[in-house]
Amino acid sequence: MKRRIGIAIGLLFALGNEADAQKDSGAPMRPASSGVYTTQQAKVGEEAYAGMCTGCHTPASHMGDVFTNAWSGRPVSELYGFIRAAMPKNEPGSLTAEEYAAIVAYILKLNGMPAGKQPLPADSAALDRIRIDVKKGG
């Protein structure tokens, strides 16, 4: 258990350093509140979440202050990378990149981020340029 926590913490630091390097490169950051996923993608994410995640998590565990305190201000790539590396718990990394992106879209929807016209990309470099900007109580 301690080893898994250590790996997860190490992964978050590595992802954070990668994201910081991307931000320092001058690439513009886009807020998630600008509509970074589609309604259909969030629906696919909701279905994937129901099938793969609800055995261990409820949607409430990924929304509101719980989510905001952990992820606000961070690039979406960190959330995507964490979920992809650690979930589902019994088979981390077993979903497609698009399924992970859809689940992230669903989590953004749960936190009041509006849908847009383009799907959330399943590409870490593109996700580095999107900032989670949900506010407390949002």
Image (spheres, helix red, strand yellow):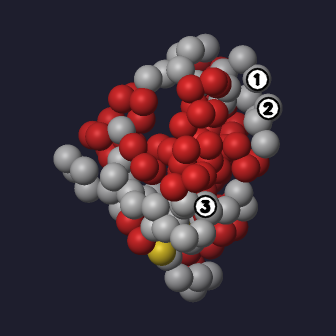
Residue 106 x, y percent position in the rendering: 51, 45
Q: Please give the label number shown on residue 94.
A: 2
Q: Residue drawn 47% across and 44% down?
A: 107
Question: How many residues crowd around disc 2 within 10 Å: few (fewer than 14), some, or many (20 or more)?
Answer: some
On screen, residue 125 above or below 94? below
Residue at mark 3 to residue at mark 2: CA–CA distance: 19 Å
Please name the amino acid that badge 1 sits on: Glu
> Farthest residue in the bottom direction?
26
Mark 3 lies on a secondary structure that is loop
Label 3 with label 2: CB-CB less than 8 Å:
no
On screen, residue 112 above or below 58? below
Q: Circle 3 sits on which residue? A: 120
Please name the amino acid that badge 3 sits on: Leu
Residue 49 x, y percent position in the rendering: 58, 31
28 relative position to 80: left or right:
left
Q: Circle 1 sits on which residue? A: 91
30 relative position to 118: left or right:
left
Q: Residue drawn 56% across and 78% down?
A: 24
Mark 1 lies on a secondary structure that is loop
Label 3 with label 1: CB-CB less than 8 Å:
no
Question: How many residues crowd around disc 3 within 10 Å: few (fewer than 14), some, or many (20 or more)?
Answer: many
Label 1 with label 2: CB-CB less than 8 Å:
yes
**Which is nearer the N-term, disc 3 or disc 1?**
1
Please name the amino acid that badge 2 sits on: Ser
